[in-house]
Structures are given as C-alpha cells and as structure tokens.
Amino acid sequence: MNDRAADGAKGPAGSETPAPGTQRRTSQRSRLTALIVACALFMQNLDSTVIATALPTIARAFGSDPVHMNVALTAYLLSLAVFIPASGWIADRYGAKHVFRLAIIVFTIGSVLCGFSNSLGELVAARAFQGLGGAMMVPVGRLVLLRTVPKHELVAAMAWLSTPALLGPVLGPPIGGFIVEYFSWRAIFQINIPMGILGVVLVTLYVDDIREPGGAPFDWAGFVLSGTALASLMFGLETMGRGIFSPWVSWAAIGVGVGSGLLYGWHARRHAAPLIDFGLLKYRTFLVAVAGGTLFRIGIGAIPFLLPMMLQLTFGKSATESGLITFASSLGALAMKPAATRALRLLGFRDTLLVNCVISSVLLGLVAFFQPAWPIALIYLILLAGGFFRSLQFTAFNALAYADIPRPKMGFATGFYATVQQVSATLGVTVGAASLTITMALSGAHEPQLQDFATAFLVVAAFSLCSLPASLLLPRDAAQDMSGHVRRG
C-alpha cells in the first residue's frame, strides 16, 4: 500500500480527511513532493535576485551603461507576465508532471545561455527564454502539489513553498556578490545547472503524473489580451522613476496595460473558459487569498528593496554586512515551518490571518525606527520575528486559496494566483521606491536619508495592515478540513 492510500486520502479535491482536531501526520511522499517543488521555487527566486547584484560587473564586461542593464531583469519579468496565465491550461492538456519537468529543463537551458552571453542583446534574449521556463515552473509545480498531496496535509506542504519565497530574495544578493567578487559573473548562472539536473531526476522518479481529462480549447484572444495587459503594466511599473526611459514611456505602458486589462475583462465575461477566470473569485476562500494576499505582499515585497539600501546608505554597512543582517528574516521563516500547522489547528484560518496580520505589520513598522546606535541583537530579533510571522501569513494565504476550488478548475486557479503574486511583488517594489522618492522630494534631499526610509517602511507596513478587512470575510470555520481547527463552545 502506498503512502497516499495509507493516509486514506484521494487528493486535495474531495479528499477523505481526518476529523478536525485529530492528529495529522504528513506522509513521506507528500513531504518529498513538497520539497521537490520548493527546490524549484527556490532556484527561481535565488536566480532573480543573484543577477541584480552582478549587473554592474556584467555591464563592464559588455561595455554597456549599468543603468540600461536593468532591461535584463525586465525581460525576465515580462516573459513571466505573458506566459504564467497559460500555465494552468498547458498543464491540464499535457500533464502537470511533464510540463513541470520541461519547465525546469527550459529554465536551466536559459541559465546556460545567459552564462554564454557576450552582449546585452544576447543576455536579454536568454533571460526572456529563461522566463518562459520560470512562468511554467512555479504555478505548475504548485499544481503538482495540489493534485498529489491530500487536502489535510496541504498546509504543511505549503509551508515548504513559503520558505524559499522568503529565502531567495535575501540569500541572492550576498551569494551574487561573493560569486562576482571571487569567481566570474558567468558562474551566477552556472549554479542553476546542477540544481536543474537534480530537479529533473527527482521529478521523473518521485512525482505522480496526474492530469485532468478533456478541457476547453485554448483561449488565444485571452492570451494576447492578458499578456499585453500584464507585460505593459509590469514594464511601466518596473521602469517608473528608474531613469531608464522617459516618464511618458512608463505612463504610456501603464495606459496600454489598463486598456488591455479592461478589454480582457470584457472578453472573459463572454468566453466559456477564459485563461484568467474571474469566476473563481466567487469562492470566498480564493477571493480572500487573492485580495488579502495581494495587499500583504505589496507591503512585504518592498523589504528586499528597502532594507539592504537603508543599511548600506544610512548605517554605513557593507553589502556583505547588510546581507548577513537581512538574513535574520530568512531564519525566522525557516523556524515557522513546523509551527504553521499548529497555529492553524489552534486558531483556524480566519483568526490566524487576523492576528498574524497585525503582528506582521507591527514588526514591519518597527523597522522604520531602526537606528545605527541600536544593539545589533535587537535588530536581529525584530527581523527574525518578522520573518517568522510573515512566512506564516504566506503559508496560510497559499493554502487557503485552493481550499474550495473544484479539481477541474485547479489548473486555472494556480495560473490566476501565480499571476496575482507576480504583479503584487512588482507593486511592492514600486510602492517602496515611490514612497522613498516622494519623501526625498518633500525634504529636498538628493540622497535618501534615514527619515526617508522610515517613512517608506511605515507606508508599506500600512499596506500590509490593509489586508486585515479581507480576512474578516471568512467564517470562523473556513477550510476546517484543511486546518483541523475545531471551534469549542
């Protein structure tokens, strides 16, 4: 008898689950599947931040302007934005296991091509190709997890996915700086090769091939409209205030994005199976995860942008020192994993999200009061606690999103949710940068001062706190079969 049979579970949708409040054990197969998907997610998140540190060195090697090198980052994000919405349909059509494995291969080949690039144009093309693999890798990896892990084990499995999402942005800068300083910038792409090979082997050996039969024809009109809308919005938000393009170019891109988005909304209401199905928002748990999770991620997404810059520009820390300090939040995220299932079993999804939102937002707001004279141990403690509670919030949102989604719609739900995550992460950096720019303009400073960073952190903390009302829409017994929470009289 295999692990899934021994657990008496048929899968996330319509699965047989233990009675709420009973002891729940995670099967070895579920833990292994979660770890494989988490490693793929970690590889993508690490790659996205490692390259940012190496861009000045790459610019010198290519004889290019360092400012213009940001187009390599933008090309990857645009590729993600275009192809993520199609990931669910492709996985349903060709099998999540096969698409996930192919996505890892494409991402790894793209990394190799980046390492062999000899000009900015070659690097941009390779990054766009790599983004195609990344667009399939994360949402389809999550779909693999949803279709192979029993519903009552999903919270523990999602904890594995939340951890690398927080680890990658923090580990990337110090790892990238170390590789560039002591080796070659090309090596930052080569580290993906062994990880990619290992991922392909593990997926082949240990991931089940579960797919949905049939399916509607591909929504080509929706693909064009959603791709145009998301790529234009991402381009406009990424380039806004960076000095890479004229401001009117960024605003024009945002205008095209909004217009295309409105056209897609009109199209989606009339299409039987739209690529991004807004009908999924009728499930309250999915609506809360999308709305609340977006606001929370906007606040949290600014941390990797604001914190290292504040430590280096106003605290006088080196890049390595700031990386070691920000790493404290990753340690907190690692400590969260075994606590997630206990917290949700004790409080349920609704109360966990409410209480944890307040705690996370307060801890983020405390960063605004950091001073160079503070004991380093106190700074570590606040960042450690912040990483713990943020990771718990991500785990809860990520599991809640799929609590009530019917199995045939699971592929579209993962594509929808991954798209929202990508946009909200970009908005986080945009909000953080805009807050910093506005406060500098009001104070007349040419370089950001400590009070400017303080204001920016308070602004993004307010965004995180704004996710609180969304969680109030949940009943107290929401997703009870997933959390194991029992209300006691």
Image: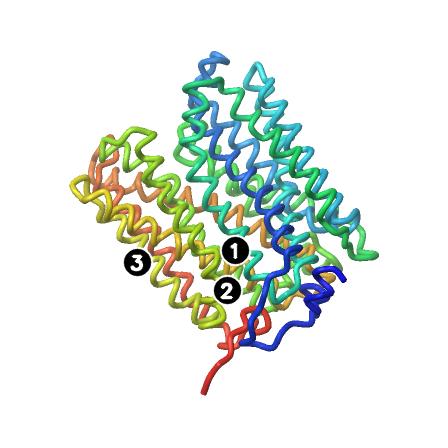
Disc 2 designates what residue?
341
Horizontally, is 402 left or right of 63 in the view?
A: right
Quadrant holding the N terminus: bottom right
Horizontally, is 331 left or right of 402 in the view?
A: left
| Amino acid on which disc 3 is placed | Val
Q: Is residue 440 above or below residue 19?
A: above
| Amino acid on which disc 1 is placed | Ala
> Residue drawn at (66%, 37%), measured in percent from left and top?
104
Disc 3 designates what residue?
362
Mark 3 residue element? helix
Horizontally, is 352 left or right of 268 in the view?
A: left
Q: Is residue 30 above or below residue 66?
A: below
Going from N to C along the chain, the mark reached first, 3 or 2, is 2
C-alpha gap between disc 3 and disc 2: 23 Å
Disc 1 designates what residue?
159
From the image, state whether disc 3 or disc 1 is nearer to you: 1
